[in-house]
Image: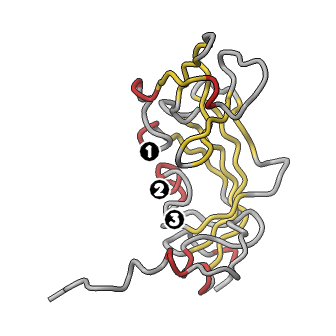
């Protein structure tokens, strides 16, 4: 089958360019002056609302996808605003409201937006910066191809714009979930 006519379906690898705007039309980010994005369809590697609208499209197609917050980065959670001692920030120097800062947590570094700055504490909004926003994606699909066996095993696309990590290390810990004692009788 000619690659150009392959349709986006589960386990296809899709390469696309996007321009992302808010509902107000303000530009958020774009890949058009960079490398396109590559992902494997059906494996939750992009926001769910966009993945749904990608299904059935083909290489060369252009379309606009409106994605509600529930199908993108979630609704804004007011409980995700927390007061944190300034000493826990790994971002140093003058901190201002609206700035994105890094915080050291038990799970490693996290990023959050500064809401308010005090003498010893900062109020941080841990919501994703795009939480609560309807996203408008202008999409241009560059290529659609079948996933390779290695991509299927790892659950994501490899190569330019894909996951691109080194698979020489022991990767098995991610992939044991199919085996074991599921009793299907």
Q: Is residue 126 visible?
A: yes
Judged from this view, the residue extending furthest toward the left is: 185
User: Residue 111 at what x, y percent from top left?
Assistant: 62, 37
Quadrant for residue 141, please give it. bottom right
Distance, label 3 to label 1, CA atoms, is 18 Å
Q: Is residue 33 above or below residue 95?
A: below
Please state which of the two labelled residues, at mark 3 or mark 1, is closer to the viewer: 1
**Quadrant of the frame with the C terminus:** bottom left
Please state which of the two labelled residues, at mark 3 or mark 2, is closer to the viewer: 2
User: Residue 183 at what x, y percent from top left?
Assistant: 19, 85
Distance, label 1 to label 2, CA atoms, is 9 Å
- Secondary structure under the numbered disc 2 in the rendered image: helix
Q: Which residue is mark 3?
A: 56
The label number, if any, that marks residue 52 in the structure image: 2
Q: Residues within 10 Å of mark 2 (few under 14, many from 20)?
A: some
- Secondary structure under the numbered disc 1 in the rendered image: helix
Please state which of the two labelled residues, at mark 1 or mark 2, is closer to the viewer: 1
Distance, label 3 to label 2, CA atoms, is 9 Å
Q: Nearer the viewer, residue 120 or 51?
A: 120
**Residue at horizontal 67%, vertical 30%?**
101
């Amino acid at each position: 089958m000619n690659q150009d006519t392959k349709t986006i379906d589960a386990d296809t690898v899709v390469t696309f360019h996007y321009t992302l705007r808010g509902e107000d039309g303000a530009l958020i980010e774009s890949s058009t002056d960079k490398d396109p994005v590559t992902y494997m369809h059906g494996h939750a590697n992009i926001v769910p609302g966009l993945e749904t609208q990608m299904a059935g499209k083909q290489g060369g197609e252009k379309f606009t996808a409106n994605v509600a917050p529930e199908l993108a980065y979630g609704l804004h959670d007011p409980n995700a605003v927390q007061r944190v001692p300034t000493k826990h920030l790994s971002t140093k120097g003058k901190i201002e409201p609206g700035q994105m800062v890094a915080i050291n947590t038990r799970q490693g570094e996290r990023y959050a937006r500064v809401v308010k700055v005090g003498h010893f504490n900062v109020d941080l909004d841990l919501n994703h910066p795009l939480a609560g926003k309807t996203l408008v994606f202008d999409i241009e699909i560059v290529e659609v191809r079948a996933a390779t066996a290695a991509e299927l095993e790892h659950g994501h696309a490899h190569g330019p714009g894909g996951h691109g990590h080194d698979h020489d290390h022991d990767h098995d810990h991610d992939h044991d979930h199919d085996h074991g004692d599921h009793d299907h009788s």
